Amino acid sequence: MTRTEVAIIGAGPAGLLLSHLLHQRGIDSVVLEARSREYVEHRQRAGMLEQGTVDVLRASGLGDRMDRVGLVHHGIELRFDRRGHRIDFPSLTGGKSVMVYAQTEIVKDLVARRLADGGAVLFESEAVALEGAESDTPLVRFRPAAAGEGAGGPEQELRCDVIVACDGYHGIGRPTLAALPAAGLRMWARDYPFAWLGVLADVAPSCDELIYARHERGFALHSMRSPSVSRLYLQVPPDADLADWPDERIWDELEARFEVDGDFKLGRGPITEKSITPMRSFVCSPMRHGRLFLAGDAAHIVPPTGAKGLNLAVSDVTLLATALTRWLRGGDPSGVDNYSQAALRRIWRAEHFSYLMTRMLHVDPAADAFDHQLALAQLRYIASSAAAAATIAENYVGLTSV
Ligand code: RFL
Ligand code: PHB
């Protein structure tokens, strides 16, 4: 039997950053992660960090590599009607910008830092039960990797003062909370009639800033990972099969959707990774009951069009690290009592923005010509009005107070 102050389920950005922030405040934690270190460090996901996320990473001593290899971006392009329209962030937001730095790199930085600081991050250790949320002695049952093999050793117990489930959308934290009637959990969800096919390609980006394109054939996004690696996404049907998308077809479709009047040439290169992601909005409330807390994707999901998921995970755990420190060290429960409400204000703002961006930029197969014209009218408004552009810019770079 092991004991710690805070048992953290999941070594994604939420769990790892929480463990790091707690360590800096003198609080002990153990992170349990079902997958291998190799797997979590290479899972392709987000790439765009809000200014506030960059500030949190820098302030906690994690900014060195990000500042060396991350790419600061001062705007994005909205592309429709065969033309590009730039949204300039600094002039519309009082000087703010964003950073392109992949989630894989943040996870690598965090794992390296936790291990260098002597932190306990147990990979291939799946939490199978979270017990005693309503008691003063919660307990996590987990199955660690047997020596030399994958997960599957004998079950073990981790006793703690608090459990924080940072175990993503498919984890056990939320179902555990939902099964406690006194928690009164409510959930809101929206599924979209499309998915994203994402690729990573060894080719220099064909643009300096991200391009969000709405085309009659569907949405496309041009992002990047470095001066020599591009990250691109295509709207596809929710039941699309990767087997139907050979590389040539992907490049042809991207080329068609990014086409403009004027010169734009989409560079092609070897595709090194391909995946399909469903699009979903989801929120649950409250994010805490007794001594069980939820943070990040465990409590909420946004469609990636607004680039908010990782940023929300960072803001949840930033709030939680301060609240838990006050509670566990000072006996002051005000921060933990207020956690859910404070986090949910920001979450709902991001939910609304992600929904708006998604509806405006994707082609809903059930929509008619009227809907299509409405989306174009909204895009033209954003392209021609500083007030409309400012609402996109301030949400994209991240609102500090909502
Ligand atoms: P994660 O990253 O899903 O980590 C959860 C971890 O928990 C582990 N786990 C368990 N471990 C132990 N025991 C159990 N029983 C467990 N059950 C699960 C899992 O193995 C996993 O390691 O959640 P976290 O930390 O909350 O982080 C959230 C972000 O990963 C997510 O919101 C973003 O990736 C979303 N997202 C984007 N966010 C942005 O802010 N900017 C972007 O540009 C952006 N682009 C994206 C995205 C997500 C995408 N996909 C694939 C969903 C682009 C895409 C395509
Ligand atoms: C990415 O670079 O992966 C990315 C960027 C912006 C988004 C979504 C994904 O809105």
Image: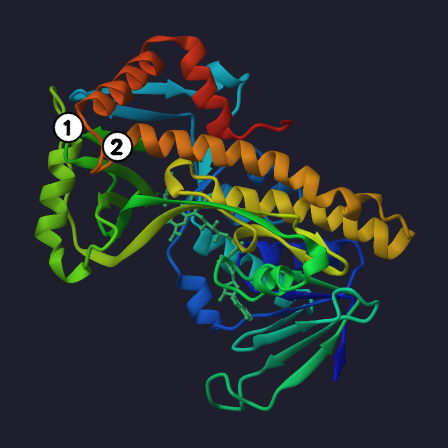
Determine the residue located farthest toward the right in the rendered image: 331
Amino acid type of the residue tagged 1 in the rendering: Phe
Residue at mark 1: 264
Instruction: Give whichever of discs 1 and 2 has the lower sequence position.
Output: 2
Question: Under tag 1, what secondary structure?
Answer: loop
84 vs 219: above or below: above
Residue under the image location 55 percent in, 16 percent down: 94
Could one spot residue 228 in this view of the protein?
A: no
Point out residue 252 in the picture as x, y percentages from the top left corner.
9, 43
Q: Is residue 84 left or right of residue 243?
A: right
Point out residue 390 in the picture as x, y percentages from the top left corner.
46, 16
Answer with the quarter of the image where residue 129 lies: bottom right
Disc 1 and disc 2 in contact, CB within 8 angstroms: yes
From the viewer's side, name the closer residue of 246 and 189: 189
Residue at mark 2: 207
Residue under the image location 26 percent in, 32 percent down: 207
Q: Is residue 15 left or right of residue 65?
A: right
Ligand 2, what quadrant? top left
**Image quadrant occupied by the N terminus:** bottom right
